[in-house]
Image (cartoon, helix red, strand yellow):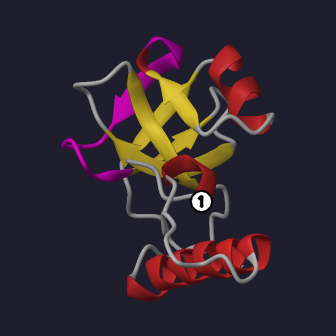
């Protein structure tokens, strides 16, 4: 069962929706139709199609051409400490698996690639 969503909603064009559905982690401002609710830069928003289908949730930034950086496409995710700890843990585990014993130095988080944009 989906959780109750309390985030502002950004309606995305067909073009923008197709990009997100094909795996693109960003939604450009030019690919949006409307913002519903009060939103400030840095807030989490829900992105939906023009028909209201949920696309994902992400960080909002009106100062950038990239209006939304997708955090998750799971409508049941809660963006709490456990969510971010899990993402960081997965990123570290991935690097340890790929790098083997060569772990003297590495970038812990690589932004969008690790599902932690911005």
Q: Give coordinates of residue 14: x percent, y percent.
A: 70, 18
Please state which of residues 88 and 33 is positioned toward the viewer in this rendering.
Answer: 88
Image: magenta residue range: 30-44
Q: Residue at x 38, y 56 (%)?
A: 7
List the residue tagged with mark 1. Answer: 114
Please state which of residues 95 and 88 is positioned toward the viewer in this rendering.
Answer: 95
Vertical placement of residue 19 versus 59, above or below: above
Q: Is residue 3 magenta?
A: no
Q: Give coordinates of residue 56: x percent, y percent.
A: 60, 50
Please state which of residues 44 and 48 is positioned toward the viewer in this rendering.
Answer: 44
Q: Residue furthest bottom?
A: 82
Q: Residue at x 42, y 19 (%)?
A: 29
Q: Residue at x 61, y 40 (%)?
A: 25
Vertical placement of residue 67 versus 4, above or below: above
- What is the number of callouts on the image? 1
Q: Give coordinates of residue 6: x percent, y percent.
A: 38, 63
Q: Is residue 58 left or right of residue 86?
A: left
Q: Residue at x 57, y 83 (%)?
A: 89
Q: Residue furthest top?
A: 30
Q: Secondary structure at mark 1?
A: helix
Quarter of the picture containing the N terminus is bottom right
Q: Give coordinates of residue 5: x percent, y percent.
A: 47, 64
Q: Is residue 39 magenta?
A: yes
Vertical placement of residue 40 versus 84, above or below: above
Would you identify the image quadrant in which residue 35 lies? top left
Structural crowding at the residue carrying mark 1, measured as other residues with C-alpha within 10 Å and reported as few (<14), some (14–19) or many (≥20) = some
Would you identify the image quadrant in which residue 22 lies? top right
């Amino acid at each position: 069962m989906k959780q109750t969503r309390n985030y502002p909603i950004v309606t995305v064009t067909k073009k923008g929706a197709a990009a997100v559905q094909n795996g693109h982690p960003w939604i450009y401002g030019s690919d949006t139709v409307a913002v519903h609710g009060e939103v400030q830069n840095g807030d989490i928003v829900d992105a939906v199609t023009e028909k209201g289908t949920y696309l994902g949730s992400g960080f909002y930034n009106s100062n950038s051409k990239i209006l939304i950086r997708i955090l998750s496409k799971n409508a049941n995710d809660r963006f709490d400490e456990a969510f971010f700890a899990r993402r960081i843990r997965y990123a570290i585990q991935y690097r340890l698996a790929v790098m083997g014993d060569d772990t003297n130095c590495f970038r812990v988080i690589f932004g969008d690639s690790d599902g932690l944009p911005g």
